Amino acid sequence: MESVDSRDEEAPLVADSLQVLTPKNYTRDVHILSCAFLLIFLAYGAAQNLETTVNTEGNLGTISLGILYTSFTCFSLVASLVVRVLGSKNALILGTTGYWLFVAANLFPSWYTMVPASLYLGFAASIIWVGEGTYLTSAALSHASNHKLHEGTVIGSFNGEFWGMFASHQFVGNLITLAVLKDDKGGSTSGTTLLFIVFLGVITLGTILMCFLRKEEDKGEKETADASVNFYSYLVSLSKSITTLLADVRMLLIIPLFAYSGLQQAFVWAEFTKEIVTPALGVSGVGGAMAVYGAFDAICSLAAGRLTTGLPSITFIVSGGAIAQVVVFLWILINYRVTSGVLGTLYPLIMAALLGIGDGVLNTQLSALLGILFKHDTEGAFAQLKVWQCASIAVVFFIGPYISLQAMLIVMVVGICVSLVGILFLTIQVEKAFYSSRS
């Protein structure tokens, strides 16, 4: 009897030890992060698509977006410092407030509301995206370590899920836009106020969902929290991080791809919607075209993430996405004309699908690439991504009204060519170094 009792007393201890030994599963946090970003960006993304077509007086919409991405670029230089001080989760939650304020400003669009909201969103966006890249990479590396999985495969899988969910914001958000907005007689559009109110509610839900993320358990974050009083040491560390990354040949070879990823996004938001979609489908048709863009973006993000295993696979996938976008640019540049009938409706939708394929590939593969090559300084690497990405976006919004569509398309084609040369050379160099170390 005593032996039975002793076994009963030991049973809970054995169960507790088994529970402790069970590796932590980070897929829950990836699901939450992905859903939260979907909610926030289905609202913001659809609002951004409408900026250049709704807020047209004095080019308010275009200039506001230019200010936003200029602010985004500047704040990205210090975003890694803010994320290290706040922690990834807190940075993500704080970052959502900028998107809420920007959409709210669109209820009363003027220079006095849109400019301050754009400036603040630049700060908020910088920390939410550096926080996202840091959090997702840390979760992937921890998950791979705990479950004895290949790091590159887990990073690709996690990024594939996140970017697949994120890309579907274009589909969902623009379907809402398509359902709510109506083209009235005389070229005006009704339903914008209702649309922005709905978007504010959706962003609020995304912020609440973000609060359920587990705090990142990372020794680097704990160390920085203990040393948070020494602001000067942070500035020194930040400057060293920036200069070290810019002196890294690998980073220099990726920078053209960073810049091109921003160029192609800005082209879709500013030029494609205004110059191609609106003349063919009207302002209300922007939502439908961007829904197609988002659907293909999401599908290709998921597929590209599943296929990612390392640098060679990233290079191959990126090349495929680039080819899809080159087809669109050359099509518009050489032979496209607005036509009536079924083909006039179909052509912009086909272009939107091809552009979405390229964007989905770039988003997934850039994040996976940084997670693989710069896992010891993810904050700095993702900050560099946003600096170059947003600088190129800002340039498009500022110079777009003053240059022709043909000139913009030539810039896009040149950007693709330079980017592909850089990543091909990077792959050759890294693979050569890898095999040299093995021999």
Image: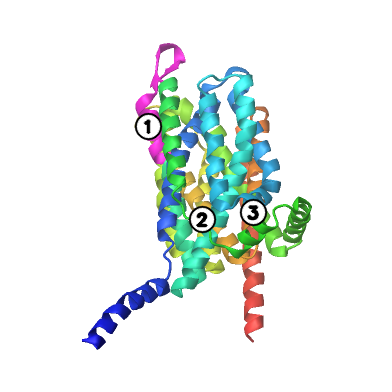
Q: Which residue is mark 2?
A: 215
User: Where residue 84 is drawn, which disc sits there?
Assistant: 3
Q: How many marks?
A: 3
Classify 249 as above or below 344: below
| Residue closest to the far left | 1
Check disc 3 and give the amino acid type: Arg
Query: Which structural element holds mark 2?
Result: loop
* Nearest to N terminus: mark 1 or mark 2: 1
What numbered label is drawn on residue 46?
none
Which range of residues does the magenta coloring cover? 170-191
Looking at the rendered structure, the secondary structure element under dot 1 is: helix
Mark whose residue sits in front, 1 or 2: 2
The quarter holding residue 339 reads top left
Q: Label 3 vs label 1: CA separation?
A: 36 Å
405 in magenta: no
List the residue tagged with mark 1.
176
Check whether the beta carbons of the residues at disc 1 and disc 2 lie within 8 A of each other. Answer: no
* Element type where label 3 sits in the image: helix
Q: In the rendered view, would you say 367 is above or below 123?
A: below
Q: Residues within 10 Å of mark 3 (few under 14, many from 20)?
A: many
Note whether residue 385 is visible: no
Q: If you read the primary sequence from the N terminus, does the residue marked by circle 3 or circle 1 appear first?
A: 3
Label 2 sits on what residue type? Lys
Task: State which tag comes first along the sequence, 3 or 2.
Answer: 3
Seen from the viewer's position, the closer of residues 54 and 7 is: 7
Question: For the residue marked with disc 1, what is the amino acid?
Answer: Ile
Residue depicted at x 44% and y 64%: 307
